[in-house]
Image (tube, rainbow, N blue to C red):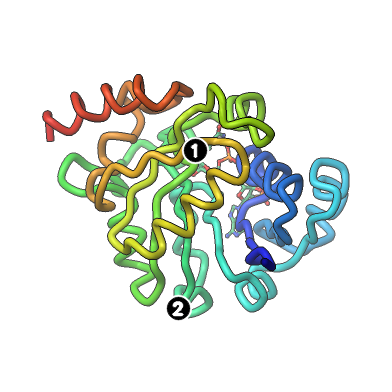
Amino acid sequence: MTKPTIGIIGAGKLGTTLGKLLVDADYPVLISGSGSTDKIALTVSVLIPGAQAVTNAELANQADIVVLALPLSKYQEIDSELLKGKLVIDAMNYWWEVDGLDNIYSDEEQSSSEKVQAYFQDSTIIKAFNHMGYHNLSDDARPDTPDNRKAQIITGDDQEAVKVVETIVETIGFTPLYIGDLKNGVILEPGSPLFGASLGVEETQAIVDEELEKV
Ligand SMILES: NC(=O)c1ccc[n+]([C@@H]2O[C@H](COP(=O)([O-])OP(=O)(O)OC[C@H]3O[C@@H](n4cnc5c(N)ncnc54)[C@H](OP(=O)(O)O)[C@@H]3O)[C@@H](O)[C@H]2O)c1
């Protein structure tokens, strides 16, 4: 079966790491940065051979699935119309050093992904790939064996889209762990014991259960 084309917005640490795993798993990958393709072409050719550097507009036009791998404070630079009708994976976190001290993107009442969903109102947002650091994403992927896999936590309100993302997670070598609606993403944000974790499914599930009791 032909794999969907995945477009990654943000050619930084997370975007390039995820891009490499996806290319290795035979997904067609497009990746864009904040400016022209010239700015990221060398990085992409070295770190993700096989991926194509494109502009945000080209990516939106050609990708079946889009990953937001840019700073949380920058997502409104992407015209929401561009991603209309798409499944969009939100891998972003609020990080004060990058996003500023005024935490308007995330609070205890609403997960950052709910805010992202409100902005990209005609897209389907699924949260994934946000809680694990990029080093772990790279080092702990086990695409060749189902044994000793680490959990990748997923939240989302649309079950069909969740299944699509679960397949991607499995294909690149992790076990998907769906923990409910986008609102539950509050337990994955900086400050949570899940943020930065790279653990097996049972261990992750135990922490998820504890954290969900608190909200
Ligand atoms: N680093 C991790 O381990 C990790 C893990 C999970 C999730 N995350 C999340 O993933 C996101 C990216 O983190 P990162 O560590 O990869 O950051 P990073 O290395 O600083 O990369 C961010 C990338 O986003 C690009 N960008 C900024 N504005 C853009 C725009 N309007 N359109 C397209 N691209 C744009 C930047 O391009 P320029 O350089 O041209 O500005 C840069 O390539 C953050 O939300 C972070 O919380 C990070």
Which residue corresponds to the image point at 25% horizontal and 52% vertical from the top-left?
181
What SS does tag 2 mark? Answer: loop
Mark nearest the camera among 1 and 2 is 2
Find disc 1 in the rendering and name its residue: 98
Residue at the image point whose x is 61% and y is 40% from the top: 14
The location of residue 27, given as percent across then percent down, is 70, 57
The amino acid marked with disc number 2 is Gly
Label 2 neighbour load within 10 Å: few <14, some 14-19, many 20+ = some
Q: Whole-percent x and y of residue 185?
A: 29, 43
Q: The N terminus lies in which quarter of the figure?
A: bottom right
- Label 1 packing within 10 angstroms: few (<14), some (14-19), many (20+): few
Q: Which residue is mark 2?
A: 85
**Mark 1: C-beta under 8 Å from nearest atom of ligand 1:** yes
Residue 109, percent from left and from top? 15, 45
Closer-to-camera residue (77/198): 198
Quarter of the image containing the C terminus? top left
Q: Residue at x 81, y 49 (%)?
A: 44
